[in-house]
Image: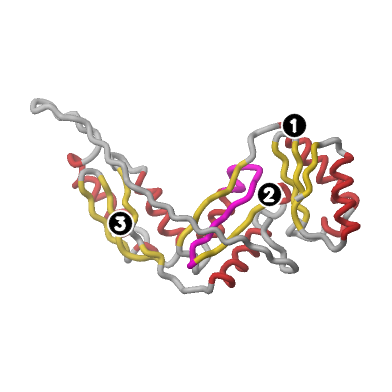
Amino acid sequence: MVPTKKKLGIAILLMAALSLPVMAQQAASPQRPQVTRGGAYDQKIQQEVNEYLRGKDKLKNVQASVEDGLVTLKGSVELLRDKMTAEEKLRHKEHVAGVRDLIVVKGKDVPDEKLRDQLADKLRYDRVDQGQVFNNLTVGVNQGVAVVGGQVRTDADRSSALYAVANTPGVKGLIDNIQVAPVSNFDDDLRVAVARAVYGKLPMYANDPQKPIRIVVDGGHVSLYGVVNSKVDRQVAVGRARHTGCDERDG
């Protein structure tokens, strides 16, 4: 899980991600053009893209060009979130065949270790009172690129975690390795049962808003992650999880 301040163990994973735009054009006959995306709409796309960029102060240093329906974005922003939002919004505009995002995230430079600690703090408390006890996230940083992994219960949990990272000054890039658990009423019931059993026996941990004992359930298999104060507390947590009749794994 995201490390507590007592124990910090981060595996740094650096991955290269290369995204190539896909261009789509339909053949056109001399008598009646059949193009629905691409070059025939370049001027219209350019106008709409320019209007969008002018309307966003955070994108004031971003420029766009359009060729054969492909939008190329250049310039700089302060936060990774602004870069990601711009690409997502423009990709879904009518007639746009693709977006080539060459925007550079400037902002301030933060040492990797310090940035990792900042992100860990954010992720530990993300979605407090919304079931974050059932999420186990990991984070590493290499040259400003954050790698977020682990397991979460819902797509909303995943989106919230990624937004928190992208909205952090100093993050230059983001690699998403988060896994979302399959929808399962049985697993949901088991999550609640294990949480009640574990935290009911160890109430001192229930008072901590970061929920230091994380409970991940997938297909009836329960994994416990986190940091506790003693081996006795660890044994109690594992024993209470087993008492629910689940197939337990101690993380």
The amino acid type, in three-letter code, at marker 3 is: Leu
| Circle nearer the N terminus (3, 2) | 3
Q: Residue at x 17, y 39 (%)?
A: 40
Q: Secondary structure at mark 2?
A: loop
> Would you say residue 154 sits in the magenta stretch?
yes
Q: Which residues are magenta?
A: 143-158
Q: Secondary structure at mark 1?
A: helix
Q: 127 left or right of 85?
A: right
* Coordinates of residue 176 in the picture (x, y in percent): 52, 51
Residue in front for this viewpoint, 223 or 187: 223
Instruction: Categorize mark 1 by other alpha carbons within 10 Å: few (<14), some (14-19), many (20+).
Output: few
The amino acid type, in three-letter code, at marker 2 is: Asn
| Circle nearer the N terminus (1, 2) | 2
In the rendered structure, are the residues bearing label 1 and label 2 in contact, judged by CB atoms less than 8 Å apart?
no
Query: Dot 2 corresponds to which residue?
Result: 135
Q: 181 left or right of 227?
A: left
Residue in front for this viewpoint, 121 or 247: 247
